[in-house]
Image (tube, helix red, strand yellow):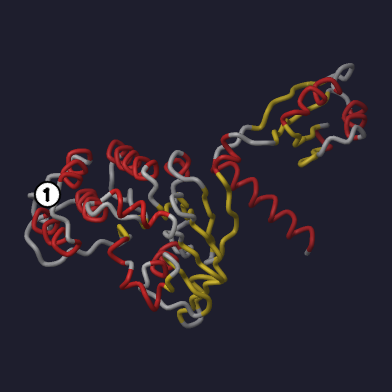
Amino acid sequence: MQERMTALESNCKIELVNVTKRFGKVIANDSVNLTIEGGKVLCLLGENGSGKTTTIRHIMGFLQPTDGAVYVNGLEAWKHSSEYIRSIGYVPGEIAFPDLKTGTAFLRSQADFLGVSDMSYANRLIEKLQLDPSASLKRMSKGMKQKTAIVAALMADPAIIVLDEPTTGLDPLMRDAFLEVIREEHRRGKTIFMSSHMFEELETTCDRVALIGNGRIENIVDLEDIRNPKKREYKIEFVSAEDYARFKTLGFPIVRDQQEYSQVTVEIPSDRLDALFSSLNGMHVKFIAEVVYNLEKYFREKLRGQKETQDHVQ
């Protein structure tokens, strides 16, 4: 199993090239460009109706783009998805089970379809997610159905994992257990594409996060740039307007300027911190604080900055 995954590892890149999808007058995807490199995790973040599921259905080969193309393992998805579909572990946003009595029957049918004879990994997942597969499918809660779908998606040790809002219906404990499973798959070199609307579950899981809104990719961030930024931001408020004005002449890059409060926010490389603090000697500083970003704050600040720029241009 491990040999098969390693053989695919260099080829399991996913690419969306100028993908647009129109349903009548509705544009569900609008010139989407994304690349998920082999062995990496890219998460698509957006509200309901933002275009996440449409993007995923293109990757799975379920939809034909109006314009553009999607490539998985170098194969165009719409034309050749049958050649790679069994190498993808897929959890859809809306789960519909076949007419079988129990979760066990469903998992056995999936194992037969995928050619899985060794159920040891599936059983590990069942234990980790505290799933009772013997329960009736019709009587399962949404969370139980989600767990069953996750086990079915991962049981064949797929080289690529595609997940559409996979933690929907899971309680916080099981959500953490599932995310640990995804981190383990990441460490094993899997290529993972996951959609979500929850910032906190992406921060510990993804290599990169793409923000989607109204079908367009609005921003992409490398999580390493947030965890270990090469530049740091400091908010400084001065006691006097004179010191505020004098500081502004020193050449430090100012990203926000609030004259009414004699306050500036500067962005500087980490190796210039000593120069910043030295420049404040002799000035009356009311307070200075580092602006620390998490994923949610980063995107909100970026989008606010983009909106302010657009408003200024208009």
Indicate the quadrant where residue 61 lies. Answer: bottom left
Q: Position of residue 102 (x, y in %)?
A: 8, 56
Q: Is 22 or 127 nearer to us in this picture? A: 127
Image coordinates for residue 210, horizontal then vertical, percent: 53, 54
Residue at point 80%, 21% (across, down): 277
Q: Residue at x 6, y 60 (%)?
A: 101
User: Considering depth in this image, is 129 or 87 the residue closer to the camera?
Assistant: 87
Q: Is residue 196 visible?
A: yes
Image position of 31 with respect to 3: above or below: below
Residue depicted at 49% across the width and 55% down the height: 37
Measured as percent of width and height from the top left, residue 80 is found at 37, 75
Q: Quadrant of the C terminus?
A: bottom right
Residue 313: quadrant of the picture? bottom right
Looking at the picture, does residue 201 appear above or below residue 33?
Answer: above
**Apparent side of residue 73 relative to residue 300 in the rendered image (left or right):** left
Q: Position of residue 111 (x, y in %)?
A: 15, 58
Q: Amino acid at mark 1?
A: Pro
Which residue in the protein does label 1 denote?
A: 133
